[in-house]
Amino acid sequence: MAIGMGLGIKQAATNAFFPLSPLHLPFFLRHSFLPFRLHVLATDIPRSSAFSSFGTSSVNIMSWPCLLRNGYGRVQMSGRQDIIAISSWNAAPCKSRSVVAAASAETLVTKKERPSAGNSSAIEKKDSDGPDRTSWRPSIDFKWIRDNKDAMAANVINRKTAADVEKVVQLYEQSCHLRGEVDKLRAERNAVANAMKGKVEASKREELIEQGKQLKERLAGLEEQLTKISELLYFEGQRIPNTTHPSVPIGPEENAVVRKQVGVKREFTFPVKDHMELGLALDLFDFEAAAEVSGNKFYYLKNEAVLLELALINWSVAQLTRKGFVPLSTPDIVRSNVVEKCGFQPRGQNTQIYSIEGTDLCLAGTAEIPVGGLYMDQIVSNSVLPLKLVAFSHCFRTEAGAAGSATRGLYRVHQFSKVEMFIICCPEHSEAFHEELISIEEELFDSLGLHFKILDMATEDLGAPAHRKFDIEAWMPGLDRYGEISSASNCTDYQSRRLNIRYRPVSEALAVKKVKGSLPPLQFVHTLNATACAVPRMIISILENYQQEDGSIIIPEVLQPYMGGLGFIRARKL
Amino acid sequence: MKGKVEASKREELIEQGKQLKERLAGLEEQLTKISELLYFEGQRIPNTTHPSVPIGPEENAVVRKQVGVKREFTFPVKDHMELGLALDLFDFEAAAEVSGNKFYYLKNEAVLLELALINWSVAQLTRKGFVPLSTPDIVRSNVVEKCGFQPRGQNTQIYSIEGTDLCLAGTAEIPVGGLYMDQIVSNSVLPLKLVAFSHCFRTEAGAAGSATRGLYRVHQFSKVEMFIICCPEHSEAFHEELISIEEELFDSLGLHFKILDMATEDLGAPAHRKFDIEAWMPGLDRYGEISSASNCTDYQSRRLNIRYRPVSEALAVKKVKGSLPPLQFVHTLNATACAVPRMIISILENYQQEDGSIIIPEVLQPYMGGLGFIRARKL
């Protein structure tokens, strides 16, 4: 299947930035989007008869003429037509459920539970009676884990995470066994109940009643055990990290493999300054005042740095919109369970996440979280995949546990603006989309004139959700080292099993025929995320690489139209 | 007791000293208590009020000026929610799941519109000599208090961060004011004119009713804010300048609006005088506030401790100690240049076409790559 990655398309229209007025921000000349019809796909809802010719994901990208004219892709939905059903945790068993069960026989799609009285962390153990009950459960494929336990155990060791595969398998076996017992007892009890209907001798009746009672007690006992084992199973199970791509280097951070280098280190004929020195001389930031107002690692941007921030955001959003990504502006505040579902720990020690007092809300550390949440508990129509989104947000991170010189200046801060790419796709395409994301990043940073390395991160550095992670580190001459400016992760189904995002992999023919019972079961989508622009790291890279001997900064050419044609940041004469 | 003293005299003195020390301690304790009470009560006293401010409740506000006229529609008007949902511009449902009520995602052209509004506002004000700032959204709670807000009252507008003394700023006014906290500003740099972009967070506790539907009242929004620090004799003139900048901005967006001199019960403690602008929102069939410009005189500066020395240049050069005039508190003013959700409402509702598409105001079109309209899609 030819997958037309957005990169392969050359824009037919010229990129014209017409300078109508200073500081104008032209994203694209003309918008033109083809009506994009979605088909509503559901087991019980009659399908609309007409559907767009852009049905299959392989055709989606190529066939949008908007891309040829600098337009951008836009999914038309009124209400939420791209979403065919909201699979509610609390829904009564519906027809599709059996299909779901068939797809992944042992994934337990459970009802929403009340949050425990304590905190809702899935990680912390209550001392007295076992793990905390969480208010949601990931759909973990325990059967698969059991069948692949050696590989899973090796994976855990490679990633150096605290997960116990053996224990999970044991608990799973136990819970299966218990469930079998419970089912047997239930059957027996039903038999007894049936036997009591109709004409029965008095003595026999009493016997049956007694049997019924005993069965009920034993059943209650077993069910209680099952609940406990289940909880333990999920507690241990959801600590198991994602699988790892076979090409990922094993070991610590240093073992990362350089996939590619782009550009070369610039040669300076004068002593280089770091971004702090440059920025303070040009009155571009104020860390001192921010330390008073907000604390360390906060900052104000001033003057041209503000214009640079806005230019970077606008330029990134424009570039990605042109490539067919749907722009989003997301909430910076999210519920803590959404944070957990994306694979972050809102309440651990050394958590990266700020929490809001008196609520179950947190500040998002990345737009990945609210974007993932946007599709939470949804069944996505196959025809809209891949969903490509670009989101702008303010990110907040505690940076607890991060210390040392790497925390100076803009390098590690508590708040920053970021433009993030997010893709939802079917499993067979995620690897290709990972490649697409990293080449988009490469293209963006190359056009900014930066020199950087693309790294295939090693197992100990992946983080639980990532199957594979590519980081880009740009050369920062003032800091005299490479510094991370972006990260692109393929999370496969780790997040979607927690966010509960699924789709039905139907071919068009089958969908039209709508032969009930022959529809393939729902599957979990794959999710990917990648940084398009983390503003402070970009500011460091630009200031340090584009500095001139007199301390002024040249603005990268592609950003100049977004700064009203401003070509440089020049020191003011006092 | 220093120096040579007779033994009996010394004892007398020691006894006197002890008694004095006790009485002193007692009085000092009283003084501390009274002082605390004094400040507690004292800081509840609101700012003085400009003599022209109408007295009474919200309804007594006086219309200073009207700009533009209500557009005549030849078809039934829709409100911004209906328009926006049909054009897939926002998602409140999903946001309610992810974050709660009164949160929202902006999508598609609405994102471009948000960025265009921010960029255009910053550009306009930078051209007028305002220094652009990007401010922290998180601030210490004492800075919030110094600006005249109540971080910990009941029905507070302010979100607090667990386990810290930090809060989410409800407006960039707070971190901008904080930027000059405890400073002595040189007379030669006044007036300081700043334009700040930030994400604002408000609990909107206690706000209920139909006025809370859609984008009108939300927990998070982007805002571009103007802030001026000046010497006292100029604040009234700068208040006029701020309101005419706002008038110019909203007029060039083609909006119809009224400028109101807000009444005493509506001022809020820090404001000496407050001008609000309410734009006509045909879909909501009423005027809705899109901006507010306050002259806080020295209310904030006395709390933020921002002062300047009113010296003439000649004196400053001479630097004759003792003949320099004493430090004085500056005056601060703040005004909304662009509160994005209210602007989106105004634009969607006023520029709607019969087929549900939206014309983009001309001044914003270059900031949206020449996009002239948001068009409904044929299904």
Image: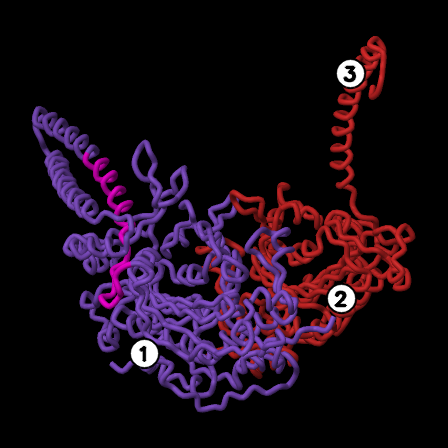
Chain colours: A purple, B red
The label number, if any, that marks residue A55 in the structure image: 1
Name the residue rendered at 24%, 45% in the picture: A233
The segment highlighted magenta reads A222-251
Secondary structure under badge 3? helix
Q: Quadrant of residue A473?
A: bottom left
Measure the C-alpha gap from mark 1 to mark 3.
94 Å
Q: Quadrant of the C terminus of chain B?
A: bottom left
Residue closest to the eye, B27 or A253: A253
Report whether mark 2 lies on the same chain as mark 1. Answer: no
The amino acid type found where label 3 is placed reads Lys
**Nearer mark to the viewer, of 3 and 2:** 3
* Rendered position, A453 above or below A458: below
Q: Is A526 placed above or below A265 here?
A: above
Q: Quadrant of the N terminus of chain B?
A: top right
Labels 1 & 3 near each other (Cβ < 8 A): no
Q: Residues within 10 Å of mark 3 (few under 14, many from 20)?
A: few
Q: Chain of mark 2?
A: B
Viewer-proximal residue, A370 or A95? A370
Query: Compared to A523, does A571 lie above or below?
Result: below
Residue type at the position of mark 2: Lys
Q: Position of residue A16 (x, y in %)?
A: 54, 88
| Labelled disc at residue B18 | 3
SS for tag 2? Answer: strand
Which of the two residues, A111 or B13, is positioned nearer the viewer here? B13
Whether tag 3 and tag 2 are in contact, CB under 8 A, the answer is no
**Image position, residue A288 (x, y; %):** 63, 56
Circle 2 sits on which residue? B258
Q: Chain of mark 1?
A: A
Q: Mark 2 packing: few (<14 Cα in 10 Å), some, or many (20+)?
A: many
- Can residue B313 be seen at all in this image of the molecule? yes
Near-viewer residue (A446 or B378): A446
